[in-house]
Amino acid sequence: MILNKMKQYHQDMKGKIILNLKKIGLIAVTGVAAVTLAACGQDGANSDIVTMKGDTIRVSDLYKEAKQYPSTGTATLLQNMTFNKIFEKEFGKKVSEKDVNKEFDTQKTSLGSNFASALQQAGYTEASYKDSIRSQLLLKEVVTSKIKFTDAEYKAAFETYHPTVETYILPETTEDAAKKLVEDAKNDAGAFDKSAKEKKAEMKFDSSNAQIPEEVKTAAFKLKDGEVSAEPISVTNAQTGTKSFYVVKMIKNADKGTDWKKYKKELKQIITTNKQNDATFVNGIIASYLKDYNVKVKPTEFSNIFSSYEAAVTGSSSSSKSK
């Protein structure tokens, strides 16, 4: 998931790693939101807060969850608890402990020595982070099960798809250093290639790769075999505002041709990722499960915690009718 060879890009991505597992629907830590449980507990620990087909969330359940996630707001806790109960019933058998550990280890490796501090910053322990990963993997199963992979979807994805290319990508923290790399490549291509290999700068990626900055991919795909980017490629970190500069040499570019079926596997993953990142699509799916499970919230102060999902469906329906 995270490419280990781009040290500077790693620096840029570190602030995003935890956020990647806090997608739509299953929101994790909110930071400073206070847990206001007093109102819920007035009728006792066994009083119902959320009811649904085949299950219930009681005050005692909420207290237990709040202890595990002390910096998460009550409304978010109730949302997550409800979604987890529903999705575990529907797709629990499709997400194994091995799947969770694999994703956890990937994240841990990608952050290296910064992993512990990143978890703490986001309000997680290792155990609660694994729970969050499981929730996200369940959500992926939920969303994927509702995607219709039609020829039209494949063709649309194919329009902007670029097949896997082989490159050298060298990141620098200053523009001057990057400009020097460009000059070095012009003056002695052999020495440049040798240096790039020593720096383990060889990269293979296609247009769906989310870890390569879009600016770098766009510039790279325009290069011919053996060609080096004429100018450093500037990339601004959205989180920190800091700039990085990249120099790209194309080793082997690729022409996708006209047959989208040749890349059906890759295009299917692109369609899946796009749908998983489509808030309206995901919220609509969640809303349908809330309806199917007849989810009801008892305390009036939390009666609107699922309104955003219902609104997504209403908005989508209105939009469809207006077309």
Image (tube, rainbow, N blue to C red):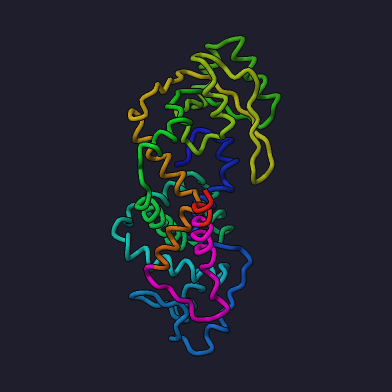
Viewer-side residue, 273 vs 285: 285
Q: Name the spot of residue 160 as percent of width and height, x first.
A: 48, 31
Quarter assignment of residue 223: top right
Q: Can you name the residue that lies furthest to the right here?
A: 176
Magenta stretch in the rendered image: 292-317
Q: Residue at x 62, y 20 (%)?
A: 181
311 in the magenta segment: yes
Residue 314 lies left or right of residue 85; in this view the side is: right
Q: Residue at x 59, y 58 (%)?
A: 121
Q: Residue at x 52, y 23 (%)?
A: 221
100 in the magenta segment: no
Q: Is residue 56 above or below residue 185?
A: below
Quarter assignment of residue 268: top left
Q: Name the spot of residue 255 as percent of width and height, x first.
A: 43, 20
Q: Can you name the residue that lies furthest to the left here?
A: 93
Q: Name the spot of residue 46 as percent of width and height, x first.
A: 43, 86
Q: Is residue 4 above or below residue 233?
A: below
Residue 91 lies left or right of residue 270; in this view the side is: left
Q: Name the spot of residue 75 as percent of width and height, x first.
A: 54, 71
Viewer-side residue, 210 vs 276: 276
Q: Is residue 80 above or below residue 53?
A: above
Q: Can you name the residue that lies furthest to the top here?
A: 187
Viewer-side residue, 317 vs 297: 317
- Quarter of the N terminus within the rendering: top left
Viewer-side residue, 121 vs 263: 263
Q: Can you name the residue that lies furthest to the bottom here?
A: 43
Q: Is residue 233 above or below residue 99?
A: above
Residue 43 lies left or right of residue 53; in this view the side is: right
